[in-house]
Amino acid sequence: MAKKSKIAKNEQRLVIVNRYAAKRLELKKALVDPASTDAQREEARLGLQKLPRDASPVRLRGRDAIDGRPRGYLKQFGISRVRFRDMAHRGELPGITKSSW
């Protein structure tokens, strides 16, 4: 079980990422637009730098939906490898079977 403060901080980052997503996308488009001038690109770059650090989606951490475990996170299922294995053995994941050959 992860610390509750770490889970809460990650949730707060998610809120900030969503809040600034549109503005960030607009600035990034201005950076790569071939029709924009050097001054416009510089202004877009400075605008990106002025956004909060936590506005970047790279800073989000994939965590287990149930207990918040940060390592061994399986994005497709939203849970960690440990919980995935337990749930698969109990038959709680439809379509997942233990392989044997």
Image (cartoon, grey):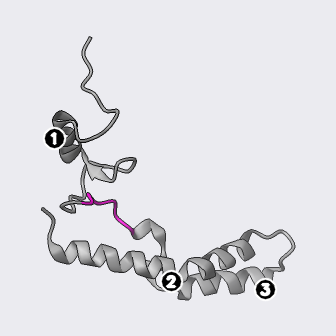
Q: Tell me, yes or no, whether the highlighted magenta stretch contains residue 87.
A: no
Q: Amino acid at mark 2?
A: Arg
Neighbor class of circle 1 (other Cα within 10 Å; few <14, some 14-19, many 20+) is: few
Q: Earlier in the sequence, mark 1 or mark 2?
A: 2
How far apart are the alpha carbons under marks 1 and 3?
56 Å
Quadrant housing the C terminus: top left
Q: Amino acid at mark 1?
A: Asp
Neighbor class of circle 2 (other Cα within 10 Å; few <14, some 14-19, many 20+) is: few
Q: Does dot 3 land on a helix, a strand or a loop?
A: helix
Q: Quadrant location of residue 98? A: top left
Q: Quadrant location of residue 16? A: bottom left
Q: Could you tell whether 57 is left or right of 86 in the image?
A: right
Which residue is drawn at the image coordinates 59% and 81% (left, top)?
48
Magenta highlight range? 60-65
Above or below residue 79? Residue 51 is: below
Which mark is on residue 86?
A: 1
Q: Amino acid at mark 3?
A: Ala
Quadrant housing the N terminus: bottom left
Which mark is on residue 19?
A: 2
Q: Which residue is mark 3?
A: 39
Which residue is drawn at the image coordinates 79% and 70% (left, top)?
33
